[in-house]
Image: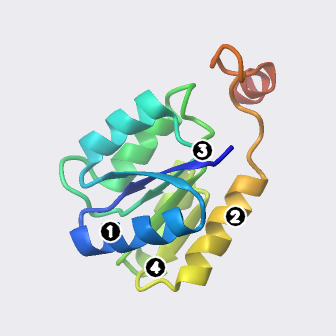
Amino acid sequence: MNKTILLIENDKLLRSNFSDLLELEGFNVLTAEDGWLGLTLAKVVRPDLIICEINIPSIDGYELLQILRDRITTAKTPFIFLSSQSKEDGYARAKQLGANDYLTKPVESRELLAAINQQLRILPCKHSAISGQPSAYFIQKHLK
């Protein structure tokens, strides 16, 4: 079964290029050009991983991550920031909010794919394959 990645990027060309790269690697890719659409897709689809630019329209990446971390169904979804901000400017805040990784643009394809693969390898079973509800493991980890 292919993993689903939600890519939230306001730059149309970058969004298209990254989406094409990920699809060539066998991922199902959903894209959003702003924070509200990204939030909606994250809630409805529950992707296996989210890649998000920090400076996006409507709600920024930091606020989006905070909202997702506060929801039981998306709290543990791996989240990678892909940003034009330097690591010194945004890394500490991203980690404080619960981002799993922080990549700065321009990013090499191999670096992006390595970050994605690292996060997907450590992904615990978060939902029941039958009911779609949060798994017991996920609930126990979230309540601690």
Circle 2 packing at 10 Å, graded few (<14), some (14-19), many (20+), is few
Three-letter amino acid code at disc 1? Ser
Residue 105, horizontal then vertical, whole percent:
41, 82
First along the sequence among labels 3 and 1: 1
Asked if the residue under mark 2 is in contact with the one under mark 4, i.e. CB atoms within 8 Å, the reply is no
Closer to the camera in the image, 107 or 92: 107
Q: Residue at x 78, y 52 (%)?
A: 122
The image quarter in which residue 131 lies: top right
Three-letter amino acid code at disc 4? Thr
Q: Which mark is residue 104?
A: 4
| Residue topped by disc 3 | 48
First along the sequence among labels 4 and 1: 1
Circle 1 packing at 10 Å, graded few (<14), some (14-19), many (20+), is some
CA distance for labels 3 and 1: 19 Å
First along the sequence among labels 2 and 3: 3
Q: Which mark is residue 16?
A: 1
Q: Quadrant of the N terminus?
A: top right
Circle 3 packing at 10 Å, graded few (<14), some (14-19), many (20+), is many
Regarding mark 4 in the picture, which secondary structure is present there? strand
Decide if residue 105 is on the left or right side of residue 101.
Answer: left
Circle 4 packing at 10 Å, graded few (<14), some (14-19), many (20+), is some
Q: Which mark is residue 117?
A: 2
Q: Is residue 1 above or below residue 144?
A: below
Circle 4 or circle 1, nearest the eye:
1
Q: Is residue 120 above or below residue 41?
A: below
Asked if the residue under mark 3 is in contact with the one under mark 4, i.e. CB atoms within 8 Å, the reply is no
First along the sequence among labels 4 and 2: 4
